[in-house]
Image (tube, helix red, strand yellow):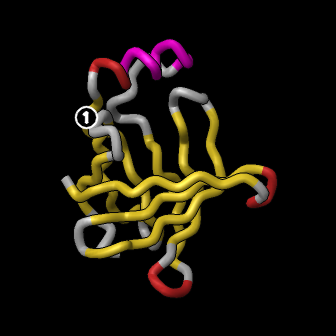
Amino acid sequence: MQAIAGTWINPKGSVAVHASNCGARLCGWVSWASPTALNDAAEAGVPRLVGTELLQDYRPGTGGRWSGRVYVPDMGRSFQSTIEPVDAEHLKISGCILGGLFCRSQIWRRG
């Protein structure tokens, strides 16, 4: 878990998430957000983006991959998700719907 613990910044540089252990699981909360991200979240019904748990209930799997749920504030929904380290400075976060039929991935950088 130590490879994933820390602060991570999304590809647009608009949100920073602090990931840490939640018992044997991994969780992550928004620690900073740009004005645009704050406005997008507010329009989607999330008035306080900073402090919102985006990375929810991730459990370790094989090959360094973690499985859990990712909350997407501007959609107001959570999706099945995996996190896997790309290298020491980057994470691949993937979210899927319909049992994995449609997936989207992003590479986040260490903050």
Q: Is mark 1 on a helix, strand or loop?
A: strand
Name the quadrant of the N terminus: bottom left
Where is residue 18? Give x, y as percent. 29, 51
> 22 or 40, which is in the foreground?
40
Residue at the disc numbered 1: 32
Q: Residue at x 73, y 53 (%)?
A: 102
Where is residue 66? Give x, y as percent. 51, 71
92 in relation to 50, above or below: below
Counting the numbered discs, the total is 1
46 in relation to 3, above or below: above
Q: Confirm whether the magenta stretch covers residue 42.
A: yes
> Which region is colored magenta?
38-45
For residue 35, what is the image quadrant? top left
For residue 23, what is the image quadrant? bottom left
Horizontal arrangement in the rendering, residue 111 relative to residue 63 (left or right)? left
88 in relation to 76, above or below: below
Where is residue 89? Give x, y as percent. 23, 67
Q: Residue at x 53, y 27 (%)?
A: 74
Q: Which residue is drawn at 55% across and 18% down?
A: 44
> Farthest left residue?
111
> 43 or 101, which is in the foreground?
101
Q: Is the magenta stretch mostly helix, strand or loop?
A: helix
Q: Which amino acid type is shown beneath numbered disc 1? A: Trp
Where is residue 100? Give x, y as percent. 74, 60
Q: Which residue is drawn at 46% across and 15% down?
A: 42
Sort mark 1 into few (<14), some (14-19) or many (20+) by Cα contacts within 10 Å: some
Q: Confirm whether the magenta stretch covers residue 52.
A: no
Horizontal arrangement in the rendering, residue 103 relative to residue 46 (left or right)? right
